[in-house]
Image: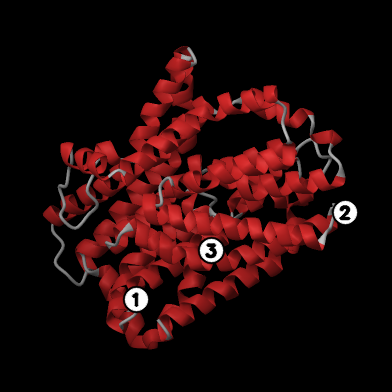
Amino acid sequence: MHSYLLWATPTLVVALAIAFLKWNAARAALLGLALTVPIAFLTGPLPFSIDKLGESLLRGSWIGGTIAPYILGGLLFWRVASSKHALDAADATAADLDPHARRRRLFFACFLVGPFAESATGFGVGMVGTVMMLRHLGLAPRHLMVFALLSQTFIPWGAMSSGTLLGAAYLRVSPTDLALYSAVPVATLMLLWLTLFWLTLRQAKENISIAECGWELLWVAASLVSLVACTYLLGPETALLAAFSPLIILRYLVDERPNAQALRQRAIACLPYGLIIGWLAATRLIAGLREWLSTLVFFRPFPDLPMLLPLMHSGLWFLVAALLTAACRKQTHTLKAEVVGSWSTGKQAVWTVFLFAMMAEMLNKSGIAQGLAQGLFAALGPDAMVLTPALAGALGIIANTGNAGNSLLLPPLSTLAAQAGISLLATGAVVHVSGLALGFFSPVRMSIAAKLSHGASQERSVYLFLLPFALAAFAVMTCFAWLSTFHG
């Protein structure tokens, strides 16, 4: 028992530092990594030497290095390609919308534009885009806060699916397979998020129409089907961008009925997105091009970790697209400021990925991850897997990211799943989606929504309103954990 407590100390300290000391995830991860070193040397079940420490740090650095370009590339491209004037033009007409048009604008912002922005960048940028589209509708801050949070509902595909790629690296599985397994609980949770949307509409005294609810349900279903198809064909990194682009265009044409001038302005503003999505789709769907780009340059220093294919890496292509967009718009003089701004926004996430990856590799190499899994299985048997939504969800709420849960829980749980004969992908999907979905209720995310919506004094009332949905989301994910354990 004494050994198990010691082995769990780094994870517990990380959670406590974030929850009670209000440390950011990167600082807490650094502390967790520092604690893991002596515990691995002195108490690990497997011999842990200086060589193994160096190997763990290198392996963690490699995982972080393959993920970081997705984060920074998406951020830089978004900053360069975003058209402030297009958003301002949309805002200018928002105050004059009739009740039906207001309702359509709300759905469009929450479930299409917001997730699209979040997929390209992450870091709550989806909330920024949603609030910018809705800020002139005269909504109460508490309602605008909820609508802002609803932009986070497709979060497994957020930040170019960097969290999904990280989880797949820990599980040693295909990112596409993990994303496809994650789509089932995400689709189920969408019913919960739609209900939250409708109840918020009622509270805000917006137009309530059963027929409109039916259309919104069909739009969400179409979004999910398109997202799954694009994930299967293109991989998770750019799947949501490719899936939602035509849906956003179609919805814009149906809702706004723009004149020729407005349509031309929007087409010019969106051209960089269309070109990069088209190019990335071509690199995956055209067999000859895909084979050429995959074999021309590649790096694989560790046979059991993800290979780096620079010419197939979406994050690196987004960096190229950002440079080309700036050159074509004659805005290269702003690139330095955009790079600095992108790093300022994304640096904590980048450091967090590196530090948690190193920590996870040390726990693996020292046998601590496997030892914890064996102890948990010995104590609870397969029932231990049913606890995964609570553990991952708690870390997601505390850290405002699924990366903490993926890094700290997936290595031991993969061992536990193997011992119990449970699907590794199902286990990974439950942990991954639980951490991200329940992160919806993170205080950090709530504070961002409150700041954007000028509702800092209303966080408590919004939390009370969201509490039943948090409990329902936890219940849904616990059901999935139970099904994957005993019927998987």
Identity of the residue drawn at 38% across and 49% down:
234
Q: Quadrant of residue 134?
A: top right
Distance CA(mark 2)–CA(mark 3): 28 Å
Q: Amino acid at mark 1?
A: Ser
Residue placed under numbered mark 3 in the picture: 186
Identity of the residue drawn at 21% across and 54% down:
56
Q: Amino acid at mark 3?
A: Val
SS at mark 1 in the image: loop
SS at mark 2 in the image: loop
Name the quadrant of the C terminus: bottom left
Is tag 2's residue or tag 1's residue first in the polypeptide sequence?
2
Q: Is residue 54 above or below residue 45?
A: above
Residue placed under numbered mark 2 in the picture: 205
Residue placed under numbered mark 1 in the picture: 423
Can residue 344 be seen in the rendering of this structure? no
SS at mark 3 in the image: helix
Can residue 153 be seen in the rendering of this structure? yes
Q: Quadrant of residue 249?
A: top right
Within 10 Å of disc 3 (Cα), the crowding (few <14, some 14-19, many 20+) is: many
Mark 2 vs 3: CB contact within 8 A = no
Q: Amino acid at mark 2?
A: Lys
Q: Quadrant of residue 412?
A: bottom left
Residue 435: where, in percent of width, then height? 49, 62
Is tag 2's residue or tag 3's residue first in the polypeptide sequence?
3
Within 10 Å of disc 2 (Cα), the crowding (few <14, some 14-19, many 20+) is: few
Distance CA(mark 1)–CA(mark 3): 18 Å
Residue 60: where, in percent of width, then height? 26, 50
Is tag 1's residue or tag 3's residue first in the polypeptide sequence?
3
